[in-house]
Amino acid sequence: MKEYSMKNLRNLMLVGSSGAGKTTLSEQIFNKTKATNRLGKIDEGNTVLDFDPEEIAKKMSLGLSIGYVNHKDHRINILDAPGYPDFVGDTVVALPAVENVVIVANAAGGFEVGLELALEQLEGKKKAKIILVNRMDNEHADFEKTLESIHENSDLRPVKVHIPIGKEGAFEGVVDLVRQKAYTAAGEVEVPASMQDQMEDARLQLMEAVAETDEDLLNEFLENMELSQDHLIAGLRKCIASGEIIPAFVCSAGTGLGVMAFLQGVIDYLVSPADYPKIELVEGEDVKEFIASADGELLGYIFKLYADPSMGDFAYVRMFSGVLKTSQEFYTPEKDAKDKAGNMYYMFGKNRHDCSELRAGEIGALVKLKNARVMNSIVALNARHAIKPVDLPEATTWQALKAVNQSDEDKIGGSLQKVIAEDPTIRYDLNVETHENVLSGMGDQQLQLVLKKLKNRYKVEAELKTPRIPYKETITASAESQYRHKKQSGGRGQYGEVYFRIKPTERGEGFQFINAIVGGVIPSNFIPAIEKGLVETMEKGIIAGYQVVDVAVEVYYGSYHDVDSSEMAFKIASSMALKEGFKKCKPILLEPIYNIVIIVPSEYMGDVMGDISTRRGRIMGMEQRGKKQYLSAQMPVVEMYAYYPALKSFTQGRGRFTQEFSHYERVPEDITQKVVAAWQDNEV
């Protein structure tokens, strides 16, 4: 297979809202460059990049996939990122693998939620950002209005490089402002006379924008009110790479009009791996600069895993520097382990093409890696630096997971690990307080997809339910209690008697055991058994089955029998004395309270604040950042399990939140009574 220099490689990620036409755009590119011999269609379930059975069934992308084309002596790698918000993790993790991010906007869709989310993920990232306004043939399509909405709702100011010829049903192609040519179904043609003035105005704006980024170009422009085509192209390339200009293109992926003109723009103006040689790496606490090159030190990044039940795990890799060859050993600093490259492939959807090495700037796949996983680096054996870690978005959805059939309990762990390895925003943890396995992620669609993959790939059926709340039990008053455990049933009996003083401690102080026995009324060798009986009882709970906290128990008196007393007898006496005394101490439940930051457009603030009060939340403050409000609040975790769907509902999908544990506080009496009653009903 032909080798391409770093300058002749282009790595693109297509981002934007679900339904903006990213997958359809890819199909047109594949077909028009002869990478495929027929045009795949989403409705027919035969596209290159949406190949997973669930994607075909839902007619939408549910995971990041990869394809490539060889066109005009260039290799163009295309990463198609899912637009549905639940699957944003794929975008976040794969961003380091590309230089260019193509923001695909629906010309008839306005400022859609998925578009907003994609733009948020790009904030502060050193990437060439490109706007591609798609679906210009749709009813109500409007190129200018789409660019205005992006500018109004973000910090991006798109600069037109192409403009459309007509719109909706009359969309006929595009005008290239740099070359002053039109591209229609007939190919390259002269610009229609009716569009000459529009082209001149837009071209003037483009030249002004480029000239403002460079003193020499500005002098040329002021002197001639024109930039030469060569200088315009060179200047445009430079300021796209620096992020000073966000170029805007336009097309209809459905009809194919404008697609090849855009692809020519990718070759002419967008960033190659050679344009971004400087990479920030971390080594321990230090940040260092690495210079990537074709013959330089080995550096790669694993940005996606795809588990194929028949072929094993494919690790999608971006090589930044050096050459990785088949059978070559490398080091993965995140795992502090060596690994070995086996078979290598260039991926084209689910199809793969063999290769013997992956060179700097290229994207490919490795199989059967023993240690390296997603978000891991590939470096030389003697190196210890790594790609800077990606900041993953925090979970917004939590569900307890268990196997439907008892026979699947042993299989579910291993199968689940393979499924969730494909999406690092999904976590699977044992909640030690509630003894439940909890699956967390970015939304219900994402978690439901996990269940379907478990069933379809590994024949394991699982179900989700709302997790138990990790309440705690404590007391608000002091009391004394006494219990004598005495049992005589032939042979050696059981005897132990304890007297307790029970009182609350400060919140967070935990359990305090005080041994106030004097005079040997209870021998010292039985004191540990008394404390053990208390600890075991508090772990199991007394009024509702939850752990007891913040209690002090003083054993100050008791009695024993020379023959019948034993550690077990005193453990039982201790447990029963605590249970009886606990109920005299005005017990309450405590619930976990979380700090949350809710990020919403300003127009939804009233609805959000009203909803927080209905969820027993407290507003702690708010701050305006750009066009968003950041609302700080505290909320009980019981309300958070169902909060994300509600927030999406009354913000039209544009609200999100982050959360972290804050503290425990008292549960209202009416809720406490319901929790206690439910536990007692189950105990009967």
Image (spheres, rainbow, N blue to C red):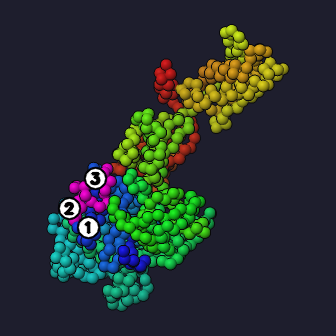
Residue placed under numbered mark 3 in the picture: 56
**Is 140 rendered above or below residue 462?**
below
**CA distance for labels 2 and 3:** 23 Å
Residue bounds of the magenta highlight: 38-56
Residue 679 is situated, as x and y percent measured from the top left of the image, at 50, 25
Q: Nearer the viewer, mark 1 or mark 3?
A: 1
Residue extending furthest toward the bottom: 223
Cα distance between the residues tagged 1 and 3? 19 Å
Residue 131 vertical position relative to residue 576 in the rendered view, above or below? below
Q: Is residue 49 magenta?
A: yes
Disc 2 crowd, CA 10 A, few/some/many (<14, 14-19, 20+): some
Percent x, y for residue 369?
A: 49, 59
Please report whichever mark, 1 or 3, sits nearer to the chain's N-terminal start.
1
- Image point (18%, 80%), residue name: 189
Q: Which mark is residue 138?
A: 2
Identify the mark at residue 14; answer none if there is no mark.
Answer: none
At 21% across and 70% down in the image, what residue appears? 257
Which amino acid is tagged 3? Answer: Ile
- Are dots 1 and 3 in contact, CB under 8 Å? no
CB atoms at circles 2 and 3 under 8 Å apart?
no
Give the mark toward the camera: 2 or 3. Answer: 3
Q: Earlier in the sequence, mark 2 or mark 1?
A: 1
